[in-house]
Amino acid sequence: MTTALALPERRTLPVVQAGTNHGAHGNLPYLRRFHEDSDVIDVEITAIDPDPTHVRNYTRHAADAGLRVVAREAKVEDIISELPERAPLLVNVDNPAAHARVLRDVADSMIAVLGGLYAVSPDGHLLGIRYVFAPTAHEEKRRAARLFADLDAVTGPGGRERVFGERGRPEHLPQEAVYRDWQGTFVEKTLAKLAKGVRLNHHPIELTRDGRTTLPVVAHESVDGWERPHVLATEAIGNAVVLRGEGFIIAEHRREGVRFHFARLGKTDGRIRVNGYAGFDRETLDAAERAERERQLQHEQSLQRADLARQQREVTEALRRAEQQTVTRRRPFFFTD
């Protein structure tokens, strides 16, 4: 008598994709791999976007990847009540205000939400930001919504063109694939855990500065002005689990913006050290603008000095050539027949 191995019955995992442009397309290879590698899960996507071109293109590419997809031309906040309970919600939109609205709208629901976006700080840091909140993390969703709302306070126009596009920094362009793999792998692994009811092992909000190293983010809302670094670190660390020797980010936020402070918990002494920050606030923007104006002024002065030196060289060279071309007893003509 032989015993046949019974294969588990496959079931559908509904996934809601909010926003269907660059970030959503970046997730498709990882959704496909999750779908193909699982013996029990079939991924079915509901794609939501108010832009008909975006949602149409995404639907076509998802179908080409072998994924089932239903298109909805709408804003996700307008159909929150229609979303299936416990269906993971992927948020890929290019402005913090939209992330804030979605997080606020799903805060009281039993919907798990994952999101990500990329940013360039005024001083040139390229940052990847991602988050995941379990269905029951109601207060955490609300706190994150306030963080993203404050982050939007000083968000400039330009979107992708300023980060990975033609108007971005040249050194950032080849890093796009690395950052998107950081986000896509996170989506794939997190969906697998959510689908099987396994406890999440990511921090609710995480950040990377190189697309490889992941740092936990501790959000801290300051009310009466920006905190001094050592005071901020002492207050913030009480709200997070950070291991000794590990780096982490303190996202200090106010209505005026957000500052991402780079910190580390000492491995031997347990002391918190804060080593600078990337600011998305008016004070930092003003300082960056002043630094940029100073850099441009120095550049212009350098060009003026270079131009003056060039003019002096040209005058000297002209005088030399004129002297060479002047017939004198010391420089006579020579003739031959």
Image (cartoon, rainbow, N blue to C red):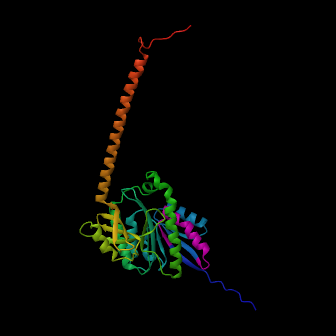
Outermost bottom residue:
1
Q: Which residues, given as a range, are shown in magenta? A: 16-41
Residue at screen point 36% across, 33% down: 309
Return the residue nearer the eye: 114 or 321.
Answer: 321
Residue 35 falls within the magenta-colored stretch: yes
Quadrant in which residue 110 is drawn: bottom left
Q: Provide residue 152's location: percent of width, then percent of height.
A: 35, 63
Q: Does residue 227 appear left or right of residue 44 in this picture?
A: left
Residue 183 falls within the magenta-colored stretch: no
Return the residue nearer the eye: 216 or 9.
Answer: 216
Residue at screen point 40% across, 63% down: 95
Quadrant in which residue 224 is drawn: bottom left
Q: Provide residue 146's location: percent of width, then percent of height.
A: 34, 70
Q: Provide residue 169's location: percent of width, then percent of height.
A: 44, 52
Outermost top residue:
337
Residue at screen point 32% across, 68% down: 252
- Quadrant showing the C terminus: top right
Q: Does residue 289 appear left or right of residue 37 in this picture?
A: left
Give the vertical position of 127 relative to 239 (above or below): above
